[in-house]
Image: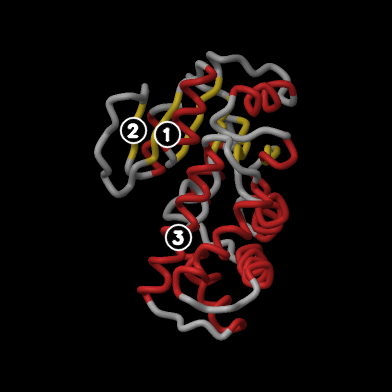
Amino acid sequence: MNYPYLLFDADNTLFDFDKANRTAFSAVCTEHDIPDTEENFRTYEQCNARMWAAFDRGEVTKDFLVVQRYRDFLAAIGLDRSAEGCNHTHLTTLGISNVLLPYAEEVCRELSRTHTLYLVTNAVASVQRERLRRSTIVPYITDAFISEEAGAAKPSTAYFDYVFAHIDGITRENCIVIGDSLSSDIKGANNYGLPCCWYNPKGAARPTDLRIDYEITDLRQLFDIV
């Protein structure tokens, strides 16, 4: 086998985060009397994306960003609501949303027979632990390395130092990072000198400033890579 240790991103690589995120936003709207419109959701997503980009650059903490995104959103739509309350509703709803992407369960089940699978994720720890606990892939995942618990986040080398310190036998040659995010998964693998596989189901344009060893549009394509 090429890569006995598989480091999977979680959201939008194994879990259908887009669907869970839209459900969570609807729950926020219902509980906090906010119009649940596609325009408002797009505004929230813009605020959310800006904050996560700042987090990836190391400019803000996760505790700050998850509330600030709602402060920015509420300011943008001109409503006086509790950003802390909105965020609490959002994270609580995300924690019970464990919908997987196509073939994720099948791929994890089959690969776990011959490989060791881990999650490498920047998601909120309480949310990710609860989602994994409820998920059908939990028997196939050896451990989950969450940035809050690691004290560092993808794409930093400090995050992967933490991962490597907790996996016996792993080397830069016998593992592979599998994820959808260019800014955290692929850049993180580049920063640490790890092989990487970009999960790109929507066929986004391939960047020129990052090394991508493999690119897949279907998780089942991993069988021929790892």
Q: Amino acid at mark 1?
A: Phe
In depth, the one of 224 and 55 nearer the eye is 55
Which x, y percent locates residue 23? Answer: 51, 72
On screen, 93 above or below 49? below
Q: Amino acid at mark 2?
A: Glu
Residue that numbered label 3 is attached to: 18
On screen, 221 above or below 213? below
Which x, y percent locates residue 144? Answer: 68, 40
Q: Are marks 2 and 1 in contact (CB under 8 Å)?
A: no
Which x, y percent locates residue 189? Answer: 50, 25
**Sooner in the amino-acid sequence: mark 3 or mark 1:** 3
Q: Secondary structure at mark 3?
A: helix
Asked where in the image residue 165 lies, by quadrant, the reply is top right
Which x, y percent locates residue 226? Answer: 46, 27
| 139 left or right of 69 in image | right
Residue that numbered label 2 is attached to: 215
Asked where in the image residue 89 lies, by quadrant, the reply is bottom right
Residue that numbered label 1 is attached to: 223
Q: Amino acid at mark 3?
A: Asp
On screen, 72 above or below 150? below
Q: Give the residue at x 27% y 33%.
A: 206
Of marks 2 and 1, the one in the foreground: 2
